[in-house]
Amino acid sequence: MLERIASPQDLRGLDQDELTDLASEIRDVLVESVSRTGGHLGPNLGVVELTLGLHRVFESPRDTLVFDTGHQSYVHKLLTGRQDFTGLRSRGGLAGYPQRSESEHDVVENSHASTSLSWAAGIARGYTLRGEHERTAVAVIGDGALTGGMAWEALNSISASHDRVVIVVNDNGRSYAPTIGGLARKLDGIRTDPRYEQFLGWGKRTFKGRGALRNFAYNTVMHGKRAVKGLITDPGMFDDLGLKYVGPVDGHDLAQVEAALTHARDFGAPVLVHVLTEKGRGYSPAEEDVADRFHAVGKIHPETGLPVQQSRFGWTKVFAEEMVAAGRERDELVGITAAMLAPVGLQPFADEFPDRVIDVGIAEQHAVTSAAGLAFAGLHPVFAVYATFLNRAFDQVLLDAALHGAGVTFMLDRAGITGDDGPSHNGMWDMALLRHVPTIQIAAPRDASSMREAFRQAIAVEDAPTVVRYPKGPVGDELPALRTVGTMEVLAEHGDMPTVAVLGLGPMAATAVDVAAKVAADGYGVIAATATWVHPIPEGLVDLLEGCTLVVTIEDGLTDAGIGQEWADAARLEGHRATWVHRGVPREFLQHASRAQIVEDAGLDATAIADTVLAELAD
């Protein structure tokens, strides 16, 4: 069936039996493909019928489909001519999120949550202003993403408009984990209302067969009986905003989905369609999993869902262990997460101290400012968050945490190059941004020991924000210091009077050691060094560089405006005269590829850097 679908137009001639077969085949393809490549499996299994309905009712690309976050767009890709998933999330293969260069059906590439409603609002208003009154902007947003403040800003704006906007709330009760907060309680009340089940059961008993049930669903919604709303429940929070509400709809009953979407499309003004789906639908390991391990997976055995290769001891686990240990010693320690309790390593702390973890939903701005409030109240909050997501709360870090001298610790997971998730998930901006915040202190540990030490030092600071950043993946070997100069740590030393210093930040410290060895092999005196606390300027930096005429910095953040540049400026101000060479990530959006490929492209591997150093020395 799937091979017959070259574009969404091909869906419109299929009957219900063919559509059922197609949905089953899509699920088989998803499990088979994603188990080989890794990717977002659970979310896509849950939106098969919903995506079929969207493409049968709306005419993409004339009508614009915007997928919030975009991790649930695999089915959309399959239905828009992209069925080769062999290279998913790999260089040259399909991106793990929508990507404009792949298809005219893709619009929003930014995979940060809660943005789709603002996109749809702007697109729909643009159509209105251009007189294109038959075009509709459709935003598909999960109940988890709907916890984000930006989504509610957009809802407030959309409700005051008369533009053709259809908001599809894909409600599965989860983001990475069960959705929390007042919105979750409201949606859960709708989802579990016994009258909803009675309504569905009555319809299926009364109208035998798919065709009859399809007519029943269509007529019930289209002719204003509003049975789903009136008979089931009062969705007051949406009505209070002035939004027409349709739902809840069984998101795995294509007839209901199409009927509701058709009604929303033909209304010609903002409508919210509430669709209930099951994450991982049709794949037993995902359906039976309560920990949501199948939201995003690595390579797995498709029969069991078990990993092909067990993950090595990672940076996140180091933090998780240290957080629990510190929590046992300090009652005032509190964890904060933005809907990612397990991925950022706070689950063990929550298991032991359930009252001392706050999940704010996908709301990083609120997380930071509420952390400042917790600090004011005498606690020490630890906000564990992916580095790329802290970008969203820079103003709050600057003016709520730093300005007010708040003792808040930010644990930045997945800092630096992350690779296969693409441009919006690389955590490469944090050091260049955060170093401009007054009073802030930033640590970039190089190994497990320095990570544990940095965390303990960070949570001891009570009058300023502290940051500990660390990469994705396994922890490398220990890199003990041979000696220290102030807070600078010498990791390798070649020759009695080094004239070259190679300074590696965080995980790039191991690269600095390798570079130093390669340069020393050509007869030069070289030292490799690092500092765990990279900002403000480490003590002893200039003393360490005495006698060095060439200094090389290596970091997994921006090359320009990064920490290396800051160190060079500080050294020059103190009168140190040397040639500085900075190696880091270019200021551009990095497309999906493996971390090793990006490192090589950026010239951040030891061989490339050593060649640059030797060429500089030869001039």
Image: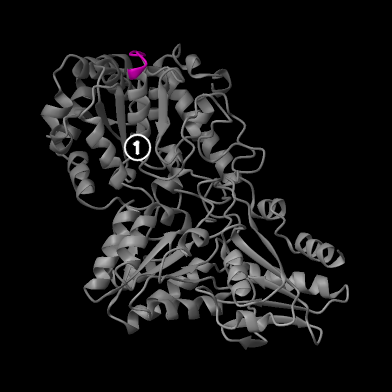
Viewer-proximal residue, 383 or 24? 383
Given the image, on which type of amino acid does mark 1 rest?
A: Ile
- Judge whether 213 appears above or below 84 on screen: above
Local SS, label 1:
strand
Task: Decide if residue 343 is in sight here.
Answer: no
Quarter placement of the N terminus: top right
Is 131 included in the stretch rendered in magenta?
A: yes
- Judge whether 95 appears above or below 319 on screen: above
Is 304 included in the stretch rendered in magenta?
A: no
Quarter placement of the C terminus: bottom right
Q: Residue at x 42, y 21 (%)?
A: 55
* Residue 309 rendering spot, x and y as whole percentages: 61, 58
Q: Residue at x 34, y 44 (%)?
A: 145
Secondary structure mostly seen in magenta is loop
- Outermost residue toward the top? 13
Q: Quadrant of residue 163?
A: top left
Task: Decide if residue 173 is in sight here.
Answer: yes
Q: Is residue 523 left or right of residue 409?
A: right
Viewer-proximal residue, 512 or 535? 535
* Residue 584 rendering spot, x and y as whole percentages: 64, 59
Q: Which residues are magenta?
A: 129-134
Q: Residue at x 54, y 41 (%)?
A: 96
Q: Across the whole image, how many numbered discs are drawn on residues?
A: 1
- Judge whether 79 appears above or below 587 on screen: above
Q: Residue at x 39, y 56 (%)?
A: 394
Which residue position is annotated with label 1? 141
How many neighbours does mark 1 have within 10 angstroms: few (below 14), some (14-19), or many (20 or more)?
many
- Judge whether 482 appears above or below 468 on screen: below
